């Protein structure tokens, strides 16, 4: 019995599916970074106005006893871009046994709107890092003042790199104060910036100087102890913290929440990291936190001191996954 006859008898029809690697995703996002940011902003505005609907079930974080790291299942359904169904299965590779020096491992799946088969599979590392940087920049855009902003970046890994590129390309930033506690990561960061954003000036300083000399600060670290507290950050008008996305990580001391407007991309961010700690201590409640979609429509620039925190939300995965697939499909055709 040949294969075609067997498929007919078993009623098996092929499910068309494409695969996009991390490098392919990176190339697409570098070629279309500004377009993606503009699309992301437009979609969030539509969402905030109630023109679009989104369903984001609670992400599932699953740990293995006695092993570092976890894996997460992050589904989303939305009518953005004509309708997107997506799920990301991503792991935090803290053991580093087989896959070296790659903290985010896993795959992103895009499902057919009607038949629910998987029509695209994407490596999840680059798209996760890029969308984390993108949502951080989107939050910053509501307070950005071109005349007197001095920007700092702590953590120069993948999220830090994409943050710097987007700051330069999308917002026109020309100087950034930078620090990473790993000299090898700093070296790779500078080489990447010299290629992808050669006109961007990188000022490599120590951690204390980056904090002191900046008016807005982006944290994208894997720190397990707080880097900022009220004493060393009271002068910062904007802080973005996107690195503390697990229970063992922390970038912010609880004292920092005093006199700051707290914004997040999703209330689900209260389930992990610093906001979970504050919530467990009864220092923070849902009523104290504003979602980005509900504030991005403000016509006037916010003058309050802002603290933006994100631990990642499946909607961003869905948006960026569909964007990458659309661009890849156009390249092929």
Image (cartoon, rainbow, N blue to C red):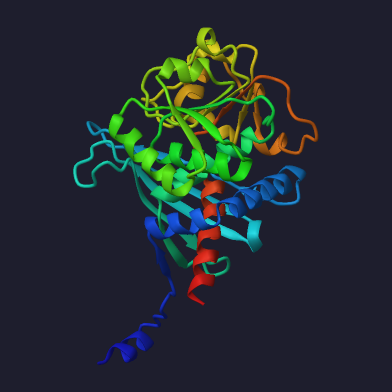
Q: How many labels does the image show?
A: 0
Please give the name of the residue rendered at 69% of the width and 33% of the height, measured from the top-left corner. 142
Is 263 on the left or on the right of 7, as rendered? right
Q: Which residue lies furthest to the top in this view?
A: 231
Q: Is residue 58 visible in the rendered structure shown here? A: no
Q: Which residue lies furthest to the right in this view?
A: 299
Please give the name of the residue rendered at 56% of the width and 47% of the height, measured from the top-left corner. 315
Q: What percent of the width, then of the height, locates residue 96?
A: 23, 40
Residue 234, quarter of the rendered image? top right
Q: Which residue lies furthest to the left in this view?
A: 97
Give 260 or 23, whichever is nearer the viewer: 23
Q: What percent of the width, then of the height, locates residue 192?
A: 40, 45
Please give the name of the residue rendered at 73% of the width and 22% of the height, measured from the top-left corner. 303
Is 301 on the left or on the right of 80, as rendered? right
Q: What percent of the width, then of the height, locates residue 202?
A: 46, 33
Quadrant occupied by the N terminus: bottom left
Is 182 on the left or on the right of 153, as rendered? left
Q: What percent of the width, then of the height, locates residue 80?
A: 65, 56
Is 52 on the left or on the right of 274, as rendered? right
Give 170 or 325, whichever is nearer the viewer: 170
């Amino acid at each position: 019995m040949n294969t075609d006859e067997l498929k007919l008898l078993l009623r098996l029809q092929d499910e068309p599916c494409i695969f996009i690697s991390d490098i392919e995703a990176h190339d697409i996002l570098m070629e279309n970074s500004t377009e993606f940011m503009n699309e992301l902003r437009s979609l969030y505005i539509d969402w905030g106005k109630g023109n679009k609907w989104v369903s984001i079930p609670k992400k599932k974080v699953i740990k293995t006893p006695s092993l570092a790291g976890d894996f997460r299942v992050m589904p989303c359904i939305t009518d953005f871009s004509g309708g997107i169904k997506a799920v990301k299965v991503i792991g935090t590779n803290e053991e580093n046994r087989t896959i070296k020096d790659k903290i985010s491992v896993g795959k992103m799946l895009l499902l057919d709107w009607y038949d629910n088969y998987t029509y695209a599979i994407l490596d999840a590392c680059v798209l996760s890092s890029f969308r984390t940087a993108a949502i951080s920049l989107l939050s910053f855009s509501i307070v950005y003042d071109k005349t007197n902003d001095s920007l700092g970046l702590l953590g120069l890994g993948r999220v830090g790199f994409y943050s710097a590129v987007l700051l330069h390309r999308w917002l026109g930033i020309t100087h950034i104060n930078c620090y990473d506690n790993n000299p090898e990561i700093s070296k790779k960061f500078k080489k990447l910036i010299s290629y992808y954003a050669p006109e961007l000036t990188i000022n490599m300083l120590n951690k204390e100087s980056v904090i002191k000399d900046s008016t807005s600060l982006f944290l994208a670290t894997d720190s397990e102890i707080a880097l900022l507290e009220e004493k060393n950050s009271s002068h910062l008008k904007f802080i973005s913290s996107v690195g503390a996305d697990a229970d063992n990580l922390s970038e912010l001391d609880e004292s920092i929440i005093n006199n700051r407007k707290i914004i997040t991309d999703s209330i689900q961010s209260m389930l992990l990291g610093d906001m979970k700690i504050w919530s467990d201590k009864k220092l923070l409640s849902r009523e104290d936190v504003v979602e980005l979609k509900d504030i991005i429509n403000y016509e006037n620039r916010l003058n309050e001191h802002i603290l933006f925190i994100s631990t990642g939300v499946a909607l961003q995965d869905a948006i960026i996954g569909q964007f990458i697939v659309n661009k890849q499909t156009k390249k092929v055709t």
